[in-house]
Image (cartoon, helix red, strand yellow):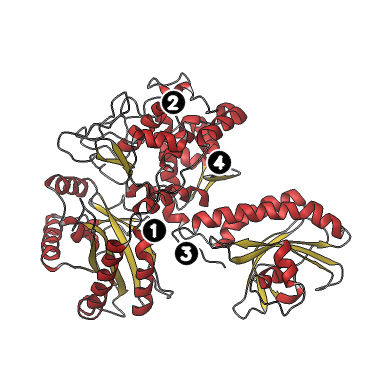
Amino acid sequence: MQAKPTNDDERATPPADGEGATPPADGKGATPPADGKGATPPADGKEATPPADGEGATPPASPKEAPAGGRTGAPAEAVTPLIRGIAVLRELTEADGTLSLSALERATGLARSTVDRITATLARMDYVRLDGRDVHLTPRLMELGNSYLSALRLPALLSARADALADELDESVSLAVADRDGIRFIHQATRRRAMSLSFRIGDLLPAERTAPGPLFATEWTDTDWRHWRDRRASDPRDLSFTAVPPRKYGAGERDDEAFVARTEEAAANGWALDDQLIEPGLVAVSVPVRSPHTGDRGKIACVASVVSHTSRHTARDLRTTLLPRLRSAVTEMERELHRTPPPEPGPPPSNLALWTGASKQRLGRDFIESLARGLTVLTAFGEGRPELTLTEVAQATGLARATARRALITYEHLDLVTTPSPRTFTLTPRVLSLGFPPLSRTSLPEIAQPHLSDLTSRIHESTSLAVLSESGEEIQCTARVTTGRVMSVNITVGTRLPAHATALGRVLLADTRDDTQPGLASIRSQGYALVDEELEEGLRSLAVPVRDRSGRVVAALNTAMHASRHSLRECVTDLLPELTATATRIESDLHTAGRFTHVPLA
């Protein structure tokens, strides 16, 4: 039975405890569009009425949703706890994924009790992890950005060609989409160098300081140009774009004229250059990838860029040497878009309404149900589901139409959702601002570490994560949590051990299908390895595999102890279920993080 929405999900009036109170007028909360373009769907939920001029919501004065046009306050039917929850996620993102509770209180302007309830709710959703007084973003949050990227389809279709071009040129290659008057990365293929590109998937850059920016600006309307000039006037040093160094001096009229000229050149040439506009030494050349689809035919779907350093290529070199190869790769990308049919809709999320209801019953007042339900709305979108009606969103999430409608109103106000037609909604690139940039660089040891800590606290034994060396003859410990015992296993991160003599190594070797070593076939079939005093007398070790999205074993998880503490039978009956459950949790995070990003194994 579907969980019944709480009152604050179904009404615009804020509850007495202030959780639904109107956001402050100081710009801490999100603000309404200046020209009324965040149109509110009618009460019957049948369609979202577009503004008269057909444009989307007015962009805020900065990426942090500062007031636009001097107006403040949210639409009457917006869900204030959802606005506040998004503000907390954005502050954590800007802080590279970690803030203390007191720092969140100061950054958001919210009461400490409100911050505590929001973070408790996000922790229940596995979107953040509470570690004492610190709040950390977790890989599970990336499912929101994954919803946008899978609905967009461009990373899935074009990333392999971008990676191949990066390998061929031995230079970094990126794909970016327009996000109002900025550009936002949706794929990065970087080179491993002492001086390498630090931009991440989801990072937002000002259009005028990039190579893709002038290309996107060729499609701007007069309204778009006005918004750009307003933003430039309110933030002349680009302080709101945290992914780029701020300007040493404020931008002037000459800079504006230069960007207009670059846009005119991009329109005439079909490509654009960035000659050290972001920082000295950084150069890039960009070419647009145009959509072949009806309705968007000929419009820019994304922009592909080759990025280098002046120590390897000057801007002129990029134009004469790398531009022809980039153009050729873009032609292949456009062919890929043209010949790939639309996908069948994938399975939508299930039982989310029931889950939020059960969580409310379990945690009581500490769980903000309207925030949790609102966030689940973003996961309704995905591959084969890029554009949904209100009814489809409600069906996908199991939420009441009124609840889904208020969440969509809120997201349209926050510029996370837009209405391409009067009856449908789509996600915007700004969804990637919810934790994706810092989490996109997460490694497997970083994913595993908190899970190892939890496991160690439950079984009171040291735990480790290891990967197989390139030679296949050794394992390397990449993460470890020790227990407080007088006698414990002395292994540290970085330690290498012979693979064939350890439980970790045997689990990893079993996946190579090399059955010349006795016992690997049985380890593969039973799903674990148990080594009893073979590496060292008195040392007993139990290990299970950790698999990536393709099912390949990429790491192994183990616990090791003195043989006197657990019998062989107890290892299987008591410890194995705990290790298996922990491996499953690590895999879940790894699969979420690795859907559109490369997760380093060490």
Q: Residue 512, position in %: x, y?
A: 63, 74
Q: Which residue is mark 3?
A: 598
Q: Secondary structure at mark 2?
A: helix
Name the front one of labels 4 and 2.
2
Name the front one of labels 4 and 3.
3
Q: CA distance from mark 3 to mark 2?
A: 38 Å
Residues 177 and 328: in front is 328
Residues 481 and 339: in front is 339
Q: Residue 105, position in %: x, y?
A: 47, 37
For marks 2 and 1, the one nearer the N-term is: 2
The circle on residue 375 is: none
For marks 3 and 1, the one nearer the N-term is: 1
Q: Which residue is mark 1?
A: 201
Neighbour tally class for label 1: few under 14, some 14-19, many 20 plus, Cα within 10 Å: many
For marks 4 and 2, the one nearer the N-term is: 2
Q: Secondary structure at mark 4?
A: helix
Position of 73 relative to 378 (above/below): above
For marks 3 and 2, the one nearer the N-term is: 2
Q: Secondary structure at mark 1?
A: loop
Q: Secondary structure at mark 3?
A: loop
Residue drawn at x 36%, y 30% is: 405
Q: Quadrant of the N terminus?
A: top right
Residue drawn at x 32%, y 41% is: 417
Q: Which residue is mark 2?
A: 9
Task: Identify residue type, mark 4.
Answer: Ala
Position of 183 relative to 540 (above/below): above
Q: CA distance from mark 2 to mark 1?
A: 33 Å
Q: Which residue is mark 4?
A: 123
Q: CA distance from mark 4 to mark 2?
A: 20 Å
Marks 4 and 2 in Cβ contact (< 8 Å): no
Q: Is residue 498 left or right of residue 231?
A: right
Q: Is residue 417 shown to the viewer in this render? A: yes
